[in-house]
Amino acid sequence: MSEMKNPPACVAKCDEDAPLTAEQVPLPQAVAKKPYQDKSPAQWAYERLILYLKNFEEQLDNEHEVAMGFTGGDAGVLRIEGIGYFDPDIVTFYGADADGTKTQLVQHVSQLNVMLRATAKEKPETPPKRIGFRLAANLEESEA
């Protein structure tokens, strides 16, 4: 069996001691199992978004969770509670805005722009929700 290779990726950082980024970490076996060229744009975007979410969360303290900021308009911030895709080209984010209103973003992969933000936990007394870790575990389980 041939060795699984990561797709081309690159990152440049000002601080050589900065934490590793998603581009620098080997792909999980479940993601690397199927060549990226054989995946739909939606599936490949979905899998990489999960890796970015997990990497971002690894750098957060216990007082913060990941949220997604929007550019343009007054859309604000979405506290990410789920992510999905619909082949061949749609990615969707589920969650709530700052007021707790149920929110969903449906995005075509050609328009995909995501800004991850650290946001204070909704309930300070509870452990932080780590959606990236949960989604990464789901990727591994779905391939088992």
Image (cartoon, rainbow, N blue to C red):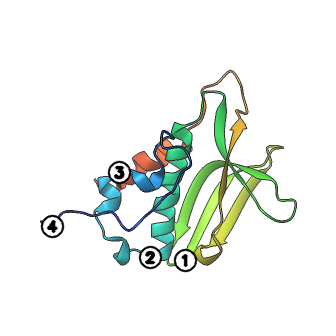
Give the image location of residue 117, x and y in percent: 68, 46
Residue 55: x, y in percent?
50, 45
Type of amino acid at the residue the image marks with label 4: Ser
Residue tagged 4: 2
Relative depth, front residue between 84 and 55: 55
- Residue identified by numbered label 2: 40
Q: Earlier in the sequence, mark 1 or mark 2?
A: 2
Label tally? 4
Give the number of the mark in front: 1 or 4.
Answer: 4
Q: Is residue 45 left or right of residue 116?
A: left
Label whose residue precedes the other's in the sequence (4 or 2): 4
91 and 63: which is toward the camera: 63
Labels 2 and 3: the sequence-earlier one = 2
* Vertical position of residue 123 compared to residue 3: above or below: above
Residue in view at x 29 percent, y 54 percent: 29
On residue 89, the disc is 1
Q: Residue furthest left?
A: 1
Q: Quadrant of the N terminus?
A: bottom left
Q: Earlier in the sequence, mark 1 or mark 4?
A: 4
